[in-house]
């Protein structure tokens, strides 16, 4: 037993004498310290969440972006007044055109003279028709008045004929009574045959007068009806002639209007042919001369040159992924890095970035570009350092941008990036409008970064 105990004692002493090398112990301590520092850094180090995008500098106004100067008429290039890179002001000549037909101006003027004569003749016809309508109206009034008077006279004759018939009938009754008396007296021998004959003659005469008065009355009534019909016919005929004249007047006015429209078109063509010098529509710089000064035939609307207008307000057009688009709101701060401008960018710590410039989101497009990315327009931040001058910041200069969101621990940001989650804003954010002008309180405004100088 004593020998076994001694053997165990020797084993323990041997294990006690075996120690780890000093380097290993130091390395283990360093690893532990590094682990503690890394955990603390991931937990305590702030990180500015951001949404990255790339784009270019553009003019905010569509009228100040790249545009083509086009030929107003068919023709050929006669003379260029500019070269590529020329600075032009609004109204400065760019190019002179010459028409392919040397006699076109003479023919256009002849055509214009013919149209002018047509207008003059149509206006003369219009005035004549106006006078004719006035004469027809006056004729209608006089004819209707005369026919009305004749109808009134016929009615008066009818009344006179009726009165004459009444008188003739009364005289006939008296003559018949006288004849009866005379015949009675002759039967008694109290009168002569001569008186009876005279009474018979008087009775026959009165009967004849009644028939004549009846015929006169019938004739007067027929005449009155005829004159009434003539009055209606006179009115209808005169109205038909007036309507016909008015229709002719409307046709003449239509001819005048058509001729004037044709004259206006000819004036436009003549003005375009006379003004074959193409002028600069805006202030800017000639970027490209597209048409050649040769025998090449140009059609109206053919591009002659590219003109870059002088921009009064430049913005940056960024394109962001549709996964990040819901977090971008108008008013969000943006850090921008321009191509050709020296910069050192730390997207998570914009306060220590160098050579970047501040901006603000002013617009987020309501629809994508067909590829799942959305356009975001960024303007200069008035509270930050001004952007470089247009000498460096020309339209089309590429730019990278970072839309700044929340400040979160670095460990959370790494975890979010590894899992592919989008940045998360405040809980009230989903209920707000995408185009709200105000920045939410959850967005931290970073300290402006110092630029690299202008």
Image (cartoon, rainbow, N blue to C red):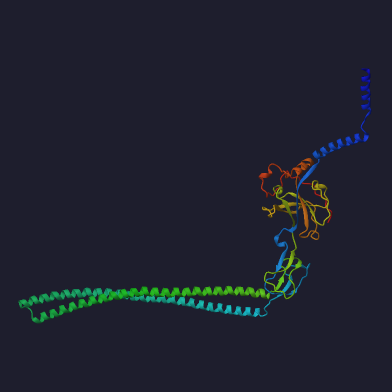
- The residue shown at (78%, 45%) is 48
- Tell me residue 453's x, y (percent): 84, 55
Residue 137 in view of the camera = no
- The residue shown at (24%, 77%) is 215
> Looking at the rendering, which quadrant does residue 24 occupy?
top right
Q: Where, quadrant-wise, is the C terminus in this rendering?
A: bottom right
Residue that protrudes farthest toward the left in the picture? 188
- The residue shown at (94%, 20%) is 6
Front position in the image: 394 or 28: 28
- Tell me residue 181's x, y (percent): 10, 75
Establish if 437 lies above or below 394: above
Left or right of 4, for residue 413: left
Front position in the image: 273 or 382: 273
> Looking at the rendering, which quadrant does residue 369 occupy?
bottom right
Residue 274 in view of the camera = yes
Left or right of 269, for residue 408: right
Establish if 308 lies above or below 444: below
- Tell me residue 314's x, y (percent): 75, 58
Q: Where, quadrant-wise, is the N terminus in this rendering?
A: top right
- Tell me residue 39's x, y (percent): 82, 37
Front position in the image: 334 or 199: 334
Left or right of 145, for residue 94: right
> Looking at the rendering, which quadrant does residue 19 occupy?
top right
């Amino acid at each position: 037993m004593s020998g076994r105990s001694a053997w165990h004692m020797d084993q323990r002493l041997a294990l006690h004498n075996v120690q780890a090398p000093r380097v290993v112990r130091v390395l283990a301590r360093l690893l532990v310290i590094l682990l503690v520092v890394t955990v603390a850094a991931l937990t305590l180090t702030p990180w500015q969440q951001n949404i990255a995008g790339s784009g270019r500098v553009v003019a905010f106004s569509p009228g100040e972006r790249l545009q083509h100067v086009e030929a107003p008429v068919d023709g050929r290039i006669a003379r260029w007044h500019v070269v590529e890179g020329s600075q032009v002001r609004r109204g400065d000549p760019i190019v002179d055109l010459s028409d392919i037909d040397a006699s076109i101006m003479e023919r256009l003027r002849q055509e214009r003279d013919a149209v002018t004569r047509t207008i003059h003749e149509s206006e003369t016809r219009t005035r004549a028709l106006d006078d004719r309508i006035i004469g027809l109206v006056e004729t209608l009034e006089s004819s209707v008045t005369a026919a009305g008077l004749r109808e009134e006279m016929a009615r008066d004759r009818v009344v006179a004929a009726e009165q004459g018939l009444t008188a003739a009938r009364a005289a006939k009754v008296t003559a018949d009574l006288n004849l009866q008396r005379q015949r009675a007296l002759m039967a008694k021998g109290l009168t002569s045959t001569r008186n009876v004959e005279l009474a018979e003659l008087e009775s026959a005469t009165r009967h004849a007068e009644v028939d004549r008065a009846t015929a006169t009355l019938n004739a007067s009534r027929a005449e009155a009806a005829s004159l009434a019909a003539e009055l209606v016919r006179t009115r209808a005929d005169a109205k038909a002639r007036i309507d016909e004249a008015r229709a002719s007047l409307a046709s003449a006015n239509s001819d005048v209007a058509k001729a004037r429209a044709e004259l206006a078109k000819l004036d436009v063509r003549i003005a375009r042919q006379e003004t074959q010098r193409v002028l600069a529509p805006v202030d800017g710089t000639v970027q490209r001369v597209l048409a050649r000064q040769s025998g090449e035939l140009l059609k109206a609307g053919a591009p002659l040159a590219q003109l870059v207008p002088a921009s009064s307000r430049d913005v940056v057009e960024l394109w962001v992924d549709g996964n990040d688009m819901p977090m971008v709101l108008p008013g969000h701060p943006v850090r921008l890095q321009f191509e050709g401008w020296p910069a050192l960018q730390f997207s998570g710590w914009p306060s220590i970035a160098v050579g970047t410039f501040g901006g603000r989101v002013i617009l987020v497009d309501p629809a994508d570009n067909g590829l799942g990315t959305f356009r975001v327009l960024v303007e200069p931040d008035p509270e930050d350092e001004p952007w470089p001058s247009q000498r460096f910041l020309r339209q089309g200069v590429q730019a990278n941008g970072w839309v700044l969101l929340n400040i979160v621990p670095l460990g959370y940001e790494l975890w979010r990036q590894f899992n592919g989650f989008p940045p998360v804003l405040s809980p009230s954010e989903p209920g707000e409008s995408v185009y709200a002008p105000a920045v939410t309180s959850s967005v931290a405004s970073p300290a402006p970064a110092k630029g690299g100088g202008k």
